[in-house]
Image (tube, grey):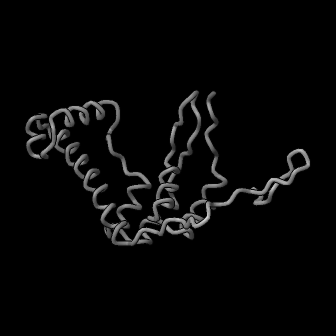
């Protein structure tokens, strides 16, 4: 995309820029990323612990008491597990969060992301069917991965086949 003006009815229309005095928000600090990552990861780990107790045969009330959650939440997780093996699979987003929290190294995260079998978003009728590449975009937008890391992953995924839209 060119960043030049264009002519409309022989009148030069400049490309709009940011409002005067606007500056992009600062990148989050590593401490803030770590703090936010730990919050996200505690939810993921709690859900996985609940799944483990379900697989071990615990009843819903006992799980809810042990996990400190509502019985309806346990029932929802159990119901989701009936159709999927897990209601909380590992995702690229989780890998980025684990790195930010100090639970995995830069190298381990990038090795896993480089070899990830990505899926990509597509339009299905009037909705978006998100792919896990969107997690990588989210990680970059939130500052969990660097521009360099994102560029490397994008170079790997650019030649991958994309799912067609369903309109």
Observer-nearest of 17 and 59:
17
Which corner quadrant holds the C terminus? Answer: top right
- Is 2 displayed left or right of 61 in the figure? right
| Residue at horizontal 51 percent and vertical 44 percent from the top | 131
| x and y percentages locating residue 127 in the rendered image | 53, 32
Position of residue 73 relative to residue 5, above or below, is above
| Residue at horizontal 32 percent and vertical 38 percent from the top | 85
Determine the residue located farthest toward the right in the rendered image.
10
Observer-nearest of 140 and 165:
140
| x and y percentages locating residue 118 in the rendered image | 53, 50
- Is 150 displayed left or right of 90 in the figure? right
Which corner quadrant holds the N terminus? Answer: bottom right
- Is 52 displayed left or right of 154 in the figure? left
Position of residue 65 relative to residue 44, above or below, is above
| x and y percentages locating residue 76 in the rendered image | 25, 33
| x and y percentages locating residue 132 in the rendered image | 49, 48
| Residue at horizontal 56 percent and vertical 65 percent from the top | 22
Snapshot quadrant of residue 101: bottom left
Position of residue 130 relative to residue 114, above or below, is above
Observer-nearest of 87 and 127:
127
* Label tally: 0
- Is 70 displayed left or right of 2 in the figure? left
């Amino acid at each position: 995309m060119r960043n030049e003006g264009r002519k409309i009815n022989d009148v030069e229309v400049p490309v709009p820029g940011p409002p005067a005095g606007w500056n992009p928000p600062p990148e989050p600090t590593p401490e803030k990323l770590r703090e936010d990552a730990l919050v996200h990861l505690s939810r993921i780990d709690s859900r996985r612990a609940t799944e483990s107790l379900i697989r071990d045969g615990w009843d819903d009330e006992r799980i809810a008491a042990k996990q400190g959650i509502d019985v309806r939440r346990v029932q929802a997780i159990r119901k989701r597990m009936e159709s999927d093996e897990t209601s909380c699979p590992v995702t690229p987003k989780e890998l980025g969060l684990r790195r930010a929290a100090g639970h995995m190294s830069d190298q381990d995260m990038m090795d896993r992301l480089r070899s990830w079998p990505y899926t990509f978003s597509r339009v299905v009728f009037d909705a978006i069917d998100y792919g896990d590449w969107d997690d990588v975009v989210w990680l970059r937008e939130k500052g969990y991965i660097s521009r360099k890391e994102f560029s490397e992953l994008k170079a790997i995924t650019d030649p991958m086949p994309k799912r067609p839209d369903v309109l």
